[in-house]
Image (tube, rainbow, N blue to C red):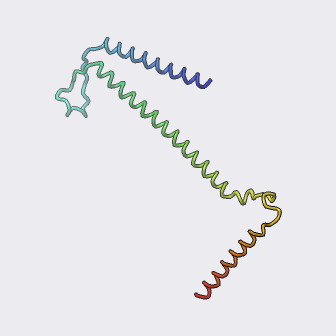
Amino acid sequence: MIRWLRIAAKATATLAFIALGILVGLFLVANGSWVPVDVPPWLADLTPEPRVQVWLPALIAGWLVATLVLAVLLLWSMYYVWRRRQYESLVARLERELARLRNLPLAEPSPLEDLPETPDPGAARVLAAIDRAVDAEDERDEASA
């Protein structure tokens, strides 16, 4: 359902742009004349005359390009804000998961059935030897200090 809808939306947008291009092209061909344009006072230094002749298709295309650039900029900024909010949400979710995992031994200790029923004598000897070695090292450090 969604795939079909996506294909239909892309086809509609493509056909709309083609139709818009044809209409704009026909409009520009039909109105290919020169028109006088008054120069605003703040741009008077750029032109020697206060009134300039401009080709109408170029004027319309300029306005169209400016409008499209503003629309693309607006859409890009909306997309940027949307993606940023997604990333911030992902980071917050990962931070919550990390905090939960850090507290896992306290919140959900391992059940007793995970521990062996009888202690391992070999492991007990190794751990006792490690404890004796640590204690002996501590005593040597205290004696030398």
> How far from the left and from the top, in percent, is residue 136?
66, 82
Q: Residue furthest top?
A: 30
Residue ID at (72%, 60%) = 106
Q: Quadrant of the N terminus?
A: top right
Vertical position of residue 115 compared to residue 73: above or below:
below
Residue ID at (22%, 23%) = 52
- Viewer-nearest residue: 122 or 103: 122
Would you say 7 lies left or right of 124 here? Answer: left
Would you say 1 lies left or right of 33 here? Answer: right
> How far from the left and from the top, in percent, is residue 67?
39, 27
Residue ID at (43%, 30%) = 71
Vertical position of residue 88 compared to residue 43: above or below:
below
Q: Which residue lies furthest to the right in this view?
A: 117
Vertical position of residue 2 compared to residue 78: above or below:
above
Q: Quadrant of the C terminus?
A: bottom right
Vertical position of residue 121 compared to residue 135: above or below:
above
Q: In which quarter of the image is residue 19?
A: top left
Q: How many marks?
A: 0
Residue ID at (70%, 76%) = 129
> How far from the left and from the top, in percent, is residue 75?
46, 33
